[in-house]
Amino acid sequence: LRALPAQLAGALLVSGSGDPRHWEGSAPDGAGVKKTPPLGGLPMAARLELLQAGGVSEPDDRQVLKGVVRALKPRGKFLMERFNRESLAYELPLQGWRVGEDGSVVLQEDTFDVLRGRYDTRQIVIDREGTREHRGSVRAYTLPELKGMFDVVGLPIHRVLGGLDLSPYRARSRRLVLFAVKGLEPESIRTVW
């Protein structure tokens, strides 16, 4: 834990509430190991096209990754924290309500659409101003999808955690934390700090 501030010194941090294609490569011994081809010489536009062809259909997500890579210096660090898709699949749907201090009532329904890979939320707010409805929908990527996205843009993942408290990542972890370093390939991906 004491090493965390040093590891993240100067890091770019982001928090946020079709699988990129796996290209077949073959190991020298013919074992048929899946690996990503070297992408270092590809311009960013071509890399973003690969993401789109591989199922990352959200243009904003592709642009955010492009901006992150552009903002980082070589060996620059990037930390992303978001909800864990696997946990959503276990826990949702949920319905609930709460009463605010001002007497307003908020009804909320959260669902996860496995076929579309989307987390959908619906809120109905009832207060002195009347009744309003708010809806939201966010693409929920799997860890392999995120790894593929990061690899394509040249941002290899070094660590995967289950929260900013440095808990180990598990399928049922509520949060997912990715630690990546621009242009530096890890020896392996660690799931504990």
Image (cartoon, rainbow, N blue to C red):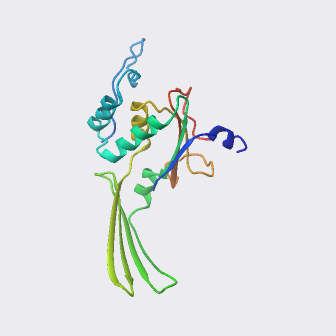
Q: As drawn, is 8 to the left or to the right of 91?
A: right
Residue 85 x/y as whole percent: 42, 51
- Please tell me whether residue 82 is drawn above or below residue 43 in the rendered image: below
- Please tell me whether residue 8 is drawn above or below residue 74 in the rendered image: below
Quarter assignment of residue 186: top right
Residue that sits furthest to the left in the current view: 53
Q: Quadrant of the N terminus?
A: top right
Residue 162 x/y as whole percent: 55, 49
Quarter assignment of residue 130: bottom left
Return the residue nearer the eye: 160 or 73: 73
Residue that sits furthest to the top in the current view: 28
Q: Quadrant of the C terminus?
A: top right
Identity of the residue drawn at 43% across and 36% down: 150
- Please tell me whether residue 96 is drawn above or below residue 158 in the rendered image: below
Q: As drawn, is 3 to the left or to the right of 116?
A: right
* Numbered disc total: 0
Q: As drawn, is 51 to the left or to the right of 143?
A: left
Residue 101 x/y as whole percent: 52, 84
Residue 78 x/y as whole percent: 53, 40
Return the residue nearer the eye: 81 or 63: 63
Return the residue nearer the eye: 86 or 158: 158
The answer to whether residue 179 is visible is yes
Quarter assignment of residue 59: top left
- Please tell me whether residue 59 is drawn above or below residue 22 in the rendered image: below
The answer to whether residue 193 is visible is no
Identity of the residue drawn at 40% across and 62% down: 92
Identity of the residue drawn at 53% across and 28% down: 74
Return the residue nearer the eye: 80 or 12: 12
